[in-house]
Image: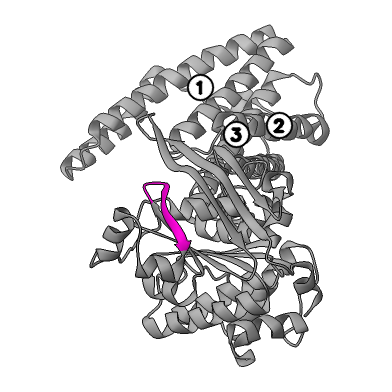
Amino acid sequence: MNMHQQQKSGTNPYVEFIDVGVTKLSQAGTSMVILDRISFTARQGEITGIIGASGSGKSTLIRLCNRLDDPSAGTIELNGQNITTIDPLLLRRKIAMVLQKPFMFHGTLLENLQRPFLFRKMAPPSAESPEIVRVLGLVQLPAEMLDRDARSLSGGEQQRVNLARALVNHPEVLLLDEPTSALDRPSTARLASTLNTICQSEHLAIIVVTHDLYLAEHIVNHLIYLEKGRIEEQGTCTQMLAMPQTTAFSNFLAQPEREETSSS
Amino acid sequence: MNNPQHIIPLNVIQLVSAYALILLSLGLARLQHIGHEKQLIWSSIRMLVQLIAVGYLLHLVFAINSPLPVVLMLLAMAGFSLQVAGSRIKKRMPNFYRVVGSSIIIGCGGVTFYFCLVVIGYSPWFDPRYLIPLAGMIFGNAMNGASLAAERLSSEMHERREEIECALSLGATSRQSAAEAIRNAYSAAMRPTINTMAATGIVALPGMMTGQILSGTEPIIAVRYQIAILCAITGAVAVTSFLIVQQGYRRFFTEAHQLKSE
């Protein structure tokens, strides 16, 4: 167990949403409720899944965790501390986010992995450094790929680089927004396996927004079903999928087509 | 520097004969069914009225020869520059007028006074014969740079939203995340001025130099003035554009390094 793991040991509630709400003004000037009284807890060593149809507020919710946006009401706590009291730059190192579309900066795969260090004004690690070797191992990318142009990689490879880049900061929480939206089933299966391994080995609290039931079934411990900005049902993933308690979630599961092309 | 004996004063008949060329343009436009005849007529009338008005205004300001009307004219130039820059841009950045207005006043005002007082060094400082035409050239060119800087910054910030949010998610500051957008906007604002410097004297003789030669100034002296004014224009475009991009990018972010929604 390394130092980071020791600091994060235990199964304390790590990210807590307490009555969080988001209200936005529409173009017509009327008030729209995007998220309404959201309360849940994401724990270390667990993967929390947020599932729901397009427009349910999933992506808005995940963006609140690392303060890409702020809620209109309620509080979000990281290990008992209100996140608005933490320097946003430090917060985003503790709570890393993998965005839906894997954006690759201009340059090689190695240069993409070095970016977070440059943002922190630190000397970028070399290809042989323990940091780079560690994250490549976590996402199962071969070291021979480090010199390749990041933008020439396949969708699945770019998603792995995206994940590795988020992990170089040694985060305590990992957020993933629709990580499988551009992946085929074999790539999704590989990513699911990787995420399970990372969650345990790094003892992370992972929050994943997805519409992909396959991914949810294979990695999620605690599942939250969101509809029109409200939590309709939450509980253990296996129980919820086997025996939905609400009509809303049953209807969602019964929909033959849940494919989404846009983020919610 | 002038020798008025060499200049041929244009009379009304000569001006009317010059307008024959506008009529020729009108005929060519009609022949090709381009459909901008009305625009051509309206623009030529506007030019006539504006220049005659400015001519009389300058005549008055030269006659008064005191600082207040000169300073008022400079402020009017800054105001018109801002208004024209704003009208050219479809998608304006947040707080556009505050950002661009302060940049034009500081950038152009500072460079104009440095150029007039330090480089040329005439006295008194408000001499309208120097200050007004030189400021006009500096403000006019910086206005183009300001439009380009502001427009490009807005479009870059819009097009690079994914890249910016990705960088922010990785712990970048708002400045670090917008670095590419800032660089591209500044470069776009400077490019025409840099190109003009490179082409001056080969592709075309600049207006100021032509005017001075026509009014009897020795070509060598006219060339020196032209070199100096091009340096001043470059400086004004650089300072104004720099201030716009540096002030401007901040308007797209909150204090917590969040990209504001569009």
Can residue B28 be seen here?
Answer: yes
In-front residue for pair B251/B85: B251
- The x and y percentages for residue A212 are 38, 70
Depth check: give the residue in front, A160 or A200: A200
- The residue tagged with tag 2: helix, strand or loop? helix
Residue at the spot of label 1: B9
Residue occupying image coordinates x 72% and y 10%: B66
Who is closer to the viewer here, A243 or B83? A243
Q: Residue furthest top?
A: B64
Q: Is residue B238 above or below residue B103?
A: below
Magenta stretch in the rendered image: A227-235
Q: Amino acid at mark 2?
A: Ile
Q: Is residue A71 magenta?
A: no
Secondary structure state at the residue bearing disc 1: loop
The majority secondary structure of the magenta stretch comes to strand
Residue B100 is labelled as 3
The N terminus of chain B - image quarter: top right
Label 3 near label 1: C-beta < 8 Å? no
- Residue A58 is labelled as none
Residues under labels 2 and 3: Cα distance? 10 Å
The answer to whether residue B200 of the structure is visible from this angle is: no
Q: Which residue is mark 2?
A: B106
